[in-house]
Image: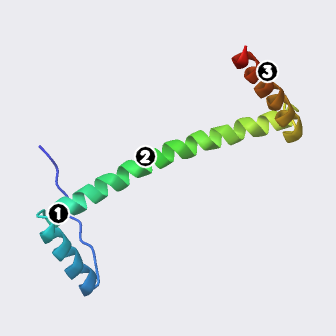
Amino acid sequence: MTRKAQLQIDLDAKLADDFAAAVTSAQTSESEVLREMVQDYVERQKVDSGYRQFLEAKVARGREDVAAGEVVAADDAEQMFAERRELALKASRS
């Protein structure tokens, strides 16, 4: 059995009228539009939460690397990859 819930929202009169007109022109129902909006919002929050967890873990690993002295200065990293790019270009020309 599907459990149903009701949601009541307060809108100013103009926004409510504009919404009703938009729904009518789209030939759908207000309930359907709101249901889709809620589903989209919930899905976005799940994705955002997953990304936030990924990012927090990445930052934590970075901090651990810094604390352990396992870092490369930006200038050194640029030099290393410039050398790699040059080798790759030479290899692709051969």
Q: Percent from the top left, x then y, of residue 51? A: 53, 43
Q: Which residue is mark 2?
A: 46
Quadrant in which the N terminus is drawn: top left
SS under mark 1: helix
Residue in the foreground of this view, choosing between 93 and 57: 93
Please tell me whether residue 8 is drawn above or below residue 85 in the rendered image.
Answer: below
Mark 3 packing: few (<14 Cα in 10 Å), some, or many (20+)?
few
Residue wearing tag 3: 87
How far apart, in angstroms, are the residues tagged by discs 2 and 1? Answer: 23 Å
Question: Quick one: label 3 or label 2, which is nearer the N terminus?
Answer: 2
Q: Earlier in the sequence, mark 2 or mark 1?
A: 1
33 vs 53, left or right, is: left
Of residues 78 and 48, the one drawn nearer to the viewer in this rendering: 78
According to the picture, the residue beneath numbered tag 1 turns out to be 31
Mark 1 residue type: Ser
Q: Nearer the viewer, residue 67 or 19?
A: 19
Q: Residue at x 12, y 70 (%)?
A: 24
Q: Position of residue 43 (x, y in %)?
A: 37, 48
